[in-house]
Amino acid sequence: MITRRRFKQTSSLANRLTENVEQLQRELARTPPGPERDRLIKRIRQSEIASHLDEWLSSPGLRPPIEASRLARK
């Protein structure tokens, strides 16, 4: 049986995403216009979106979905 190798993250997802965006922006500054630059812009955008989603999912304002049966009683 194949066993999965587990990896314990040492920093939070938000920190890793922020570091990734900063590193990609430094790389973007050195890259001339072209397909490689477009790829970097796309990766930066994806990391920023992931960061926003992580903030949203970990916010205290989220509540579990309301069940349909409880909606019908109101």
Image (cartoon, grey):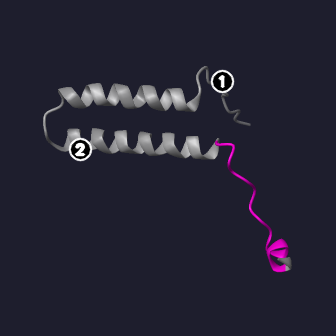
Residue holding disc 1: 8
How packed mark 2 is, by other alpha carbons closer than 10 Å (few <14, some 14-19, many 20 or more), is some
Q: Residue at (21%, 28%) from the top-left corner?
A: 29
Looking at the rendered structure, the kind of residue marked 1 is: Lys
45 and 9: which is toward the camera: 45
Q: Which range is magenta? A: 59-72
> How many angstroms separate mark 1 from mark 2 (CA)?
32 Å
Residue 71 vs residue 46: left or right? right
Residue 13, percent across and down?
Answer: 56, 32
How many tags in the picture?
2
Badge 2 element? helix
Badge 1 element? loop
Quadrant containing the C terminus in the rendered view: bottom right
Q: Which residue appears farthest toward the front when viewing the image?
A: 74
Quadrant containing the N terminus in the rendered view: top right
Residue 44 vs residue 29: left or right? right
Looking at the rendered structure, the kind of residue marked 2 is: Asp
Q: Residue at (84%, 72%) from the top-left corner?
A: 70
47 and 34: which is toward the camera: 47
Does residue 61 show up magenta in the picture?
Answer: yes
Residues under numbered marks 1 and 2 in contact, where contact means CB atoms less than 8 Å apart: no
Residue 30, percent across and down?
Answer: 18, 26
Residue 57, percent across and down?
Answer: 62, 46
Q: Relative to 66, is 3 above or below? A: above
- Say whether disc 1 or disc 2 marks the residue closer to the N-terminus: 1
Residue 53, percent across and down?
Answer: 54, 46
Which quadrant would residue 35 be assigned to in this image? top left
Residue holding disc 2: 38
Magenta stretch: helix, strand or loop mostly: loop
Which quadrant would residue 68 be assigned to in this image? bottom right
